[in-house]
Image: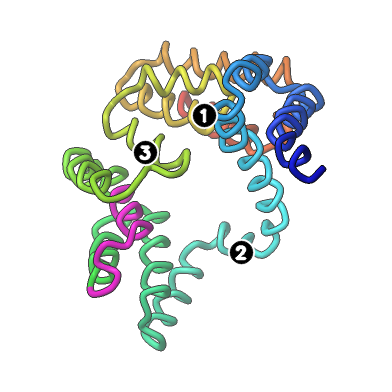
Amino acid sequence: MLYYLIGALPYILQLLLIVHIIKNHKPFLWLWLIVFLPYIGGIVYIIMEIIPDLISSDAVGKMGRNLADAVNPGRKLSELESLVKRQDTIANRTKLADCYVSLERFEEAIALYDSCLTGPYSDDADLLVKKINALFLWGKTDTAKALMDEFKKKHKLENAYLVLLDLQLSGDWEKLMDIFTNTSNFRVGYVCAEHFAKSGDTSSTQKVIDIMEENLRLYKYLKRTENFAWYKKTKKLLG
């Protein structure tokens, strides 16, 4: 009996994902992926749709605690700088570097990440990714890409964030647009729109916004997820 139950688990999971797609009005493309590519399609769906929704729900719970920092980011910075002076640990330095990135003080952030990438942490995957991201945001794309190439020799791109960062560094905007249009992931759409806006391609930026608005019209649930925040942020790219 147990043997048959274990054997049936993949089919049960597939059915649950199909129910989730229908109940939450997800794009029907996911149905085809999960039916015809059950394992790969299921994993991609969980990464691209279920996990972001869970993160969004968790973010709502944290909103009150983070409100003061959002209004006055300098307050958080001062607290972290004081904390590092009192307790100079890798964890605290990393938090301070992350704060520098959020304030676009990339040179200081990278210097801190480098100070952490020593000894047993010299090949720490999380720290390396943070440094690569900071370099990319700073406009040091070639340096970031070279570091990502080295990273991939030792580490796998184990989550959607890493895959997206790698595609950005590679300049594969066509692939990123495909991911956006096929999954309704507005974060990916924002990444594309931001690139187009910086390149002066307002028509492509508007196209991303049009796709977002069409999805919001078709799938009302999107307004209750982090996708809506990404939509509002994308709208601001055109003033």
Q: First in sequence: mark 3 or mark 1?
A: 3
Residue occupying image coordinates x 56% and y 28%? 185
Mark drawn on residue 68: 2
Q: Does the magenta stretch include residue 31?
A: no
Q: Mark 1 points at which residue?
A: 234
- Which class describes the residues within 10 Å of circle 2: few (<14), some (14-19), or many (20+)? few
Residue range (magenta): 119-134
Q: First in sequence: mark 2 or mark 1?
A: 2
- Amino acid at dot 1: Thr
- Amino acid at dot 3: Leu
| Magenta residues, dominant SS class | helix
Q: Do the residues labelled 3 and 1 touch (CB within 8 Å)?
A: no
Q: Do the residues labelled 2 and 1 touch (CB within 8 Å)?
A: no
Q: In this view, does 117 lie above or below 182?
A: below
SS under mark 3: helix
Q: Quadrant of residue 111?
A: bottom left
Q: Is residue 206 above or below residue 62?
A: above
Side of 180 where 116 appears, left or right: left
Looking at the picture, tell me which residue is in the foreground, 61 or 26: 26
Find residue 215 and report its horizontal and vertical position in percent. Answer: 65, 18
SS under mark 2: helix
Q: Mark 3 points at which residue?
A: 165
Side of 192 where 38 appears, left or right: right
Q: How far apart are marks 2 and 3 (CA)?
A: 29 Å
Side of 88 where 225 appears, left or right: right
- Which class describes the residues within 10 Å of circle 1: few (<14), some (14-19), or many (20+)? many
**Quarter of the image where the N terminus is located:** top right
